[in-house]
């Protein structure tokens, strides 16, 4: 029997209702070390707000200014741009990116705040679709309901809904290592599709195992949070 390496972590969060206009983001700290901070302060150039740094689910929805900006992650709140260190981890957000995921990763070399930041534009990612991120060098091939999954190492893809119904669907995924084209079984199971929810999947290294691991997170929001 195939070893099921597919670990699907599906969480639904009802976060505080926010204004219908402006820009929003959710934060995720994948692979956070045991001593990682649980919260930090996100500075948008004028003010900062405390943000949660969950590692196996998305944070609440946070509101940000709608113009082009540079975000910095700080260890303490700050309202004076002159007091913000230029060495603080930063990332640019284009004006047309009105909704995104802020991916946080560990960076012990940064003396101000030991993290790195990456913006993932989710503006065109709609309800019922699946957003896949492969954070390994392995290639994935498989069938996700009615959708074919082909995902090279260190790449991403958006898949359309795996079924037209609110129902279970078959999942069969294999992987191949960078130096070997032979496909190896990764996951053969059933998942459930909810057409009102966006699903985000991360393929990550599974320490001590031969195969990578798949993590799935649900991004469900109230209308006022979009």
Image (cartoon, grey):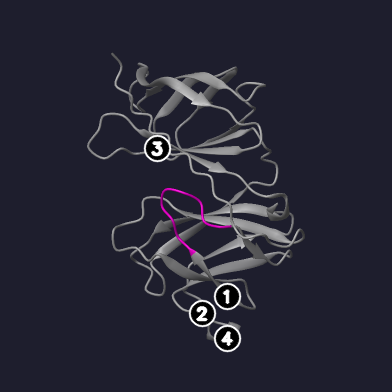
Mark 4 vs mark 1: give the one in front. 1
Query: For residue 138, which quarter of the picture?
Result: top left
At mark 3, the secondary structure is loop
Q: Position of residue 33 (x, y in %)?
A: 31, 57
Callouts 2 and 1 close, C-beta under 8 Å: yes
Q: CA distance from mark 4 to mark 1?
A: 13 Å
Name the residue beneath numbered marker 1.
48
Residue 136: numbered disc: 3
At mark 1, the secondary structure is strand
Residues in magenta, as a range:
52-60
At mark 2, the secondary structure is loop
Q: Residue furthest right?
A: 21
Q: CA distance from mark 1 to mark 3?
A: 33 Å
Callouts 1 and 3 close, C-beta under 8 Å: no
Q: Give the camera-side residue of 119 and 15.
A: 15
Q: Is residue 193 left or right of residue 6?
A: right
Q: Any magenta on residue 187?
A: no
Q: CA distance from mark 3 to mark 4?
A: 39 Å
Which residue appears at 69% of the width and 38% of the height? 126
């Amino acid at each position: 029997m195939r070893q099921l390496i597919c670990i699907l972590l599906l969480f639904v969060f009802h976060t505080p209702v926010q204004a219908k206009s402006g820009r929003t983001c959710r934060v995720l700290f994948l692979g956070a070390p045991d001593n990682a901070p649980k919260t930090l302060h996100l500075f948008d150039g004028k003010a900062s707000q405390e943000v949660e740094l969950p590692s196996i689910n998305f944070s609440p929805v946070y509101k940000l200014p709608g113009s082009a900006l540079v975000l910095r992650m700080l260890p303490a709140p700050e309202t004076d741009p002159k007091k913000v260190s230029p060495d603080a981890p930063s990332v640019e957000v284009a004006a047309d990116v009105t909704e995104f995921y802020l991916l946080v990763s560990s960076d012990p070399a940064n003396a101000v705040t030991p993290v790195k930041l990456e913006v993932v534009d989710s503006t065109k990612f709609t309800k019922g679709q699946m957003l896949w991120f492969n954070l390994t060098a392995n290639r994935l091939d498989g069938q996700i309901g009615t959708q074919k999954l082909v995902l090279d190492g260190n790449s991403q893809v958006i898949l359309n809904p795996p079924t037209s119904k609110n129902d279970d669907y078959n999942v069969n995924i294999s992987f191949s290592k960078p130096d070997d084209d032979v496909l190896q079984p990764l996951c053969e199971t059933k998942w459930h599709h909810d057409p009102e929810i966006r699903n985000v999947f991360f393929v990550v290294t599974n320490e001590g195992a031969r195969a990578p691991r798949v993590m799935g997170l649900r991004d469900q929001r109230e209308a006022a949070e979009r």
